[in-house]
Image (cartoon, rainbow, N blue to C red):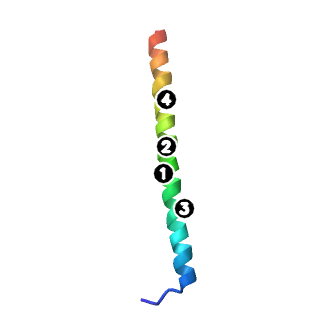
Amino acid sequence: MPQMSPMNWTLLTLLLILISSIMKTNIKINKKIYSNKYFINKNKMSQW
């Protein structure tokens, strides 16, 4: 395996941090969307 320069390691680390933060926000957004859908469905059901 070739040795990576410190610059490459820094970029790699930043990339990993970025990806993990994006994943975390995606999970939050997905939960929000899911709960909204559930709430809307509940309202539709109650209207019937």
- Label disc, if present, on residue 28 of the rendered structure: 2
Q: Mark 1 or 4 closer to N-term?
A: 1
The secondary structure type at the circle numbered 2 is helix
Q: Which residue is mark 3?
A: 18
Residue reaching furthest top? 48
Element type at marker 4?
helix
Q: Amino acid at mark 3?
A: Leu
Question: Distance of mark 2 from mark 3, alpha carbons?
Answer: 16 Å
Q: Are marks 1 and 2 in contact (CB under 8 Å)?
A: yes
Where is residue 33 drawn, in percent x and y? 51, 35
Q: Residue at x 54, y 61 (%)?
A: 18
Amino acid type, residue under disc 1 in the picture: Lys
Choose the circle earlier in sequence order: 2 or 3: 3
User: Which one is closest to the eye, mark 4 or mark 3?
Assistant: 3
At 49% from the left and 29% from the top, the residue drawn is 37
Q: Quadrant of residue 11?
A: bottom right
Residue receiving disc 4: 37
From this view, report whether residue 31 is shown above or below residue 45: below
